[in-house]
Image: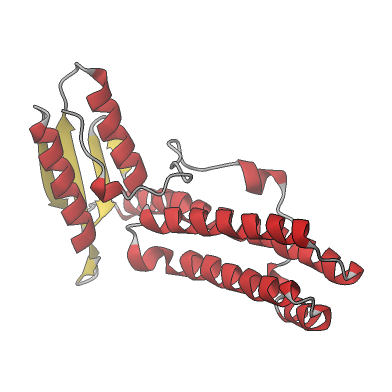
Amino acid sequence: MQEHGVMRWLQLTYKVPSEPSQKRVWVWRRLQNLGAYALQNSVYLLPYSDEVEKLFRQLAHDIQEMGGEASIFSVVALDVADEQRILHALLDCRNADYNKAVNVCAHFLHRAVALVEKQEWNEQIQAECSDILEKVHLSFRAAKRHDVLGSYTAIARASAAEAIAVCEQVFRVLQVREFTKARRLLEMNYEWIYLPTTSEKDSSPCSGESELSTDEPVSTRSAPR
C-alpha cells in the first residue's frame, strides 16, 4: 500500500440520480461494507491495493450502469496528520469487527471455566456452545469479507482467528468430557478469558455498521437498475 515511503490512496467520487432513492442507498451501503472513509458527500477514500482498485472499478461501473457518474483517482496526502487521522478511523472500524469475535470467544471460554469446575456437560450445553461457535465463525467471516486493509489489520485478524481456534480446542475436549485436559487448555490460554465491559460490547466507532449477520459476498451483490 506504500511506495517509496509515500502512502497511496484511491479516491472514488460519484454522482447518482436523485430518483429512485434506493440507488443512492445501495451505493452508500456498498461503501459502508467496504469500510471506505467518507471524505465528504460522495467522495470516499481507501488505502490503495489491487483489491480496492478492483472493487472501486466495479462499483464505478455499477454507478454508471444506473445512470450516474463515477471517477477514481490515485492520490497522496499532503498533510501527514490528516492521513493518520483517516487511517486510524478506518482501523478503528475494522478492528472493532474483529474485537466482536474476540469478545464472544471470551464469554465462551469464561463459561467453559465454570463448566470445568463443575465438571458439567450435557446435550443442551453442547448445543448452546455449538451455536455460539457457529455465530462467532459467521462474525469472523463477515469481518474478513469487509476488510480490505490488508497488513494494517493483520494483528486484529490474527488475534480473532487464534481466539476462535482456542474455543474450538476447548469445545472438542469438553465434548468427550476430558475436564482435566480442558482445564490445562484454559490455563495455557488464560489471556483470552475475560468479561468485556458494556462499552466494549456495545460501542462502535463506525457510523455505518456492517451487517454481520449476512453471508452474501459484497462483490456479488447486484446493483439496482
| Residue located 17% across and 37% down the image | 13
Whether residue 69 is visible to the viewer of this picture, yes or no, is no
Instruction: State left or right for residue 121 relative to residue 29.
Output: right
| Residue located 19% across and 72% down the image | 4
The answer to whether 207 is drawn above or below residue 160 in the figure is: above
Q: Nearer the viewer, residue 168 or 20?
A: 168
The answer to whether 119 is drawn above or below residue 210 in the figure is: below
Which quadrant would the C terminus be assigned to in this image?
top left
Percent from the top left, x then y, of residue 69? 9, 32
Percent from the top left, x then y, of residue 168? 62, 71
Instruction: State left or right for residue 202 relative to residue 221.
Output: right
| Residue located 16% across and 26% down the image | 16
Residue farthest along the right direction in this orientation: 118
Q: How are the colours assigned in the image?
A: secondary structure
The answer to which image quadrant residue 30 occupies is top left
Which quadrant would the N terminus be assigned to in this image?
bottom left
Percent from the top left, x then y, of residue 31? 30, 41
Q: Nearer the viewer, residue 191 or 26?
A: 26
Whether residue 223 is visible to the viewer of this picture, yes or no, is yes
Percent from the top left, x then y, of residue 113? 81, 68
| Residue located 75% across and 73% down the image | 174
Q: Nearer the viewer, residue 118 or 2?
A: 118
Residue farthest along the top direction in this orientation: 19
